[in-house]
Image: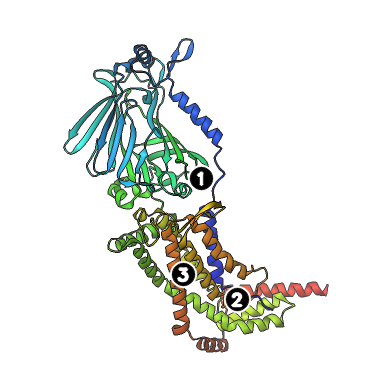
Amino acid sequence: MEEKKVDINSIIGFVLIFGILIFMFYQNKPTAEQVAAKKAQQEQLERSQVKVRDGEGQKETTPLPIDLQDSTAIANYKSSIGAFGFTPATEGTTVLENNLLYLKVSNKGGQIIEAKMKNFVTYDSVPVYLVKDGNASFGLNFTTSDNRVLNTQDLFFEPSLSQSGDNQVLSMKAKVGPDKFLEYRYEMKPDQYLVDFALRSQGLNGVINSNQPVTLDWRLKGLRHSKSIKYEDRYTRLTYMNGEDQVNKLSAGGEDDEDAENIKWLSYRQHFFSSILVTNTPFATAKLTSVDHVTEESSTAKFTKEYTTKAPLKIEGGELAYNMDWFYGPTDIKVLAQYKELGLEDSIPFGWGIFGWINRYIFTPLYSFLSSFLPYGVAIVIMTILVRLLMSPVTYKSYLSQAKMKVLKPEITELGEKYKDNAMKKQQETMKLYNKAGVSPMSGCVPALLQLPIFYALFMFFPTSFVLRQKSFLWADDLSSYDTIAQLPFHIPFYGDHVSLFPILASIAIFFYMMMTTGQNMPTQPGMPNMKFIMYLSPLMMLFFFNSYASGLSLYYFVSNLITIFIMLAIKKFILDEEKIHAQIQENKKKPKKENKFQRKMREMMEQAEEQKKIGKRK
């Protein structure tokens, strides 16, 4: 008795989906936490110490921070930093803020120690911070002419806040004299997430040792913002653009490092928010590292990934001069498009190749347009309908191929019985039948391949589209995260500790779709998998894999499969007539068919194989 088979389109579609899901969910080996912790501890210790070189070698001086109430500690501090002791050791912070962004800059190190988004909150209604409680640091490592190895994070800067029109300007100077200093200059504009940042020195020729490198050191541990830290971590990544406008990425999982060249900007992306450093003078080289701190789902974990950048800076005429920009804000195409000349839009993970192009230039503007006047969930439904209608000719071609194969099924079965002891002859006669009838058994593959770019583009669109963040629809309170209809008191491997309804609905729709296509029988082929098993496995995979994915994505697949089912029913009932298809195939058989080169080559190969088989039997 012949085993039922799903149409080739369903088989290939399933395999493609399975492959993409495995790729997206695959995680590199987990971080060795003890090694990472030890390394971080050692680096922190090294940064907290100021080393002095003398004729006898290196000495370690008093660790920082210092007690500013202790005159002896202050004296030791000034002695350890040499000429930079000219700047008073005064604790304090200065605030820069507009209606979008709040920054706090410390006298110690002259660096940003707090960066807060004013208009966004986390999943638990806490303001979104990109920098807070020491999770980030920025400084310069350099050697002085008297062989002191210093780090600006250990130096005190003198602040000066002023106005330039509507802009706030903060000058932070680490002085070695009244007119000799290292300066960090911040300029914040109204209604902007981008802050101008100038790094320069004046009169330090002879103070900084030009024969030793000045190294920029920027570190950040990504703070958790989302309900699922594992899901957020999947889209948290270090990216950078080089001088050829090529965007490169470090690994999304595990540990990774890279020696990069000619860097124009660096993005420490934390899913929906990014900390980006832009430089007008590209870094000639840089050592980049990324360490993943997420190994499993956790409700208490605070950090996703830890990033570091170490880049040597150029000294010209004994001085430093770099014009840069800090961006602290949402990874939102509407926001980043304001800085088109910097190319910051390319830091958004649209996807690679044609998939990313479709996502960026078709789905993103289409959904932005629809959601501008429709509820966000309704906009997803309407976009899904438009996509399926656009793809309906492909669906028609696929179903037509299935119908033709169904009409030929009795004759193929007859050939199978006739040549059941000769697989080669059976295959040869089957191919002749297809050729005479004008039917291609591979015609169902083309529709599946045509839909692949659409599938993958949408797979990347929903989890990374900022416009969906914290937008509700029906029972889902956030379309960019999973919906929850029940919280489980235990954790199920690969599934989680919650039940999401949209993946259940999508799985049911896929199941019924595959039930429909199962009726379109395919000829039995040796080595083919059990399609009935696949019919049940595919919805189950959807149920498990998408339980922690964006509910907007599951909503799309539910509506998409529902529409596909209706389109196939409409085609079957009102468009295709199997009797007419059968009559047309019979007419095609009567017409002489001219073989193309490929068909002729295949026939000759099969005939040669058959002849070799006969010769072998005679021997």
Whichever of callouts 2 and 1 sits on the residue coming sooner in the sequence is: 1
**Tag 3 secondary structure:** helix
User: Marks 2 and 1, Cα distance to the nearest angstrom?
Assistant: 41 Å
Asked whether the beta carbons under mark 2 and mark 1 sit within 8 Å of each other, the answer is no
Which numbered disc covers residue 336?
none
Query: Which quarter of the figure is the N terminus placed in?
Result: bottom right
**Tag 1 secondary structure:** loop
Kindly report which numbered mark, 3 or 2, lies closer to the viewer in this rendering: 3
According to the picture, the residue beneath numbered tag 1 turns out to be 253
Vertical comparison of 268 with 375: above or below? above
Vertical comparison of 56 with 39: above or below? above
Q: Residue furthest top?
A: 55
In this rendered view, identify the residue nearer to me: 10 or 475.
475
Q: Position of residue 191 (x, y in %)?
A: 23, 44
Task: Sort mark 1 into few (<14), some (14-19) or many (20+) by Cα contacts within 10 Å.
Answer: many
| Residue occupying the point 25% across, 35% down | 96
Q: Position of residue 205 (x, y in %)?
A: 32, 20
According to the picture, the residue beneath numbered tag 2 turns out to be 522
| Residue occupying the point 48% across, 48% down | 230
Tell me the quarter of the picture where residue 31 sits.
Answer: top right
Residue 540 relative to residue 151: left or right: right
